[in-house]
Image (cartoon, grey):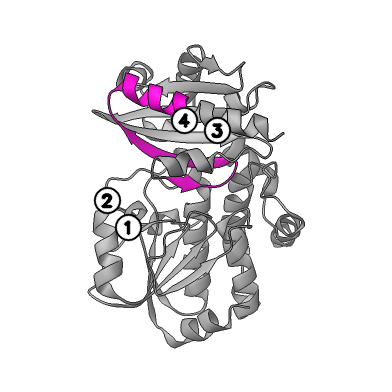
Amino acid sequence: MYEHVTKLLYSVESVALFMHINPDADCVGSSLAMYKYLTNLGKKVDVFLEPFEEIRDNLYILPNIEIINANSPASNYDLGIALDCASPTRLGKKMLKVLENCCEIKISFDHHKSYSKFTDILVLESNSASTTQILYKFFKENDKEAIDLEVATCLYAGLVSDSGNFSYNSTTVETFEVASELIAYGVDHTLLARVLYLETSYNAFNLSLRVLSNAIFHCDKKLAIITFSFDDFKSTSTKLVDTEGIVNSLVNVKEVLLALSIVEISNNEFKVGLRSKGNFDSSLIAEYFGGGGHKNASGCKVFGSKLEVLDKLVSISKYYIEKYDENL
């Protein structure tokens, strides 16, 4: 199934791995799993994240995380691999240049249906719950003996997080089979599920209380919205990475079909996270604004004043909710 990539992998010596900005557990897990796997195969491997990008505190439970940006980019790599990254802009300007200018051959492993091809070779399986699910199958086919507990732990981290703790529509029989096989390596699945999917810091908890108390609802409560301002972060001593997962509290409300998280990241620039349930495709709204993702979890950026952005998102969300209701 992955023969063309396997042959290439055995022919190279130096590899650079690239993560997307604002990395989540699937991105970090994929990158660290690939790092350890290739190291086990005797390859020289560097792992890169765009400078000044932050990694959530709970991801530091993963083995070898200290390797990220531990070395400066070399002038030449035999192979560059982008992991869990749906578009070149998601790599960040500096890391995109390294991929383009310093890597002789470029590969992407991804599971986003809205992927924009930017590498020579693409391994894309949009029906997979996570990129780590794809990697596990690739690792098994390539050289199963190079999978160890550290590799399995990183793979499971991406799987449990991007599947919504095995609750999203992307979770399939294969997802559970992969999870079962990874646990057999000795992965502490209960610890990973708690730390990566459930656990939050005291400050982030206060941030969630603050924004959830000001949640607004539209469309007979089918649409729910929370907003994060600079003042919210200042008052709770939190940062952008602390917003992760808070929107899930909204989509878990019985009446809510679609939940939006609108985060102020600079003047007139907002990061929007979308979560939905059932067959409502949140990625259609994300794609309207130039973003993308999955059916039940997607994202985009929207520009304008806070009021303008809110009005745009409410208007487009209402349109898709009404269209969805008509087809029921």
Q: Which stretch appears magenta?
A: 291-316
Which dot, 2 or 4, sits closer to the camera?
4
Is mark 2 in CB contact (under 8 Å) with mark 1? yes
- The crowd level at tag 2 (other Cα within 10 Å; few <14, some 14-19, many 20+) is few
Is mark 2 in CB contact (under 8 Å) with mark 3? no
| Sequence-first tag of 2 and 1 | 2
Q: Quadrant of residue 296 in the image?
A: top right
| Sequence-first tag of 4 and 1 | 1
| Residue 316 numbered mark, or none | 4
At label 2, which amino acid type do we have?
Answer: Pro
- Indicate the secondary structure of the residue bearing disc 3: helix
Above or below residue 174? Residue 308 is: above
Question: Which residue is under mark 2?
Answer: 51
Is mark 4 in CB contact (under 8 Å) with mark 3? yes
- Indicate the secondary structure of the residue bearing disc 4: helix
- Indicate the secondary structure of the residue bearing disc 2: loop
Question: Which residue is under mark 3?
Answer: 320
- How far separated are the C-alphas under marks 3 and 1? 41 Å
**Count of numbered marks:** 4
- The crowd level at tag 1 (other Cα within 10 Å; few <14, some 14-19, many 20+) is some
- The crowd level at tag 3 (other Cα within 10 Å; few <14, some 14-19, many 20+) is some
User: How far across and down, in percent of the image, does residue 36 sit?
Assistant: 50, 67
Describe residue 305's horizontal placement relative to residue 171 as left or right.
left
The quarter in which the N terminus is drawn is: bottom right
Describe residue 225's horizontal placement relative to residue 156 as left or right.
left
Describe residue 321's horizontal placement relative to residue 51 as left or right.
right
At label 1, which amino acid type do we have?
Answer: Asn
Above or below residue 86? Residue 81 is: below
Which dot, 3 or 1, sits closer to the camera?
3
Observer-nearest of 205 and 97 = 97
Above or below residue 293? Residue 135 is: below
Is mark 4 in CB contact (under 8 Å) with mark 1? no
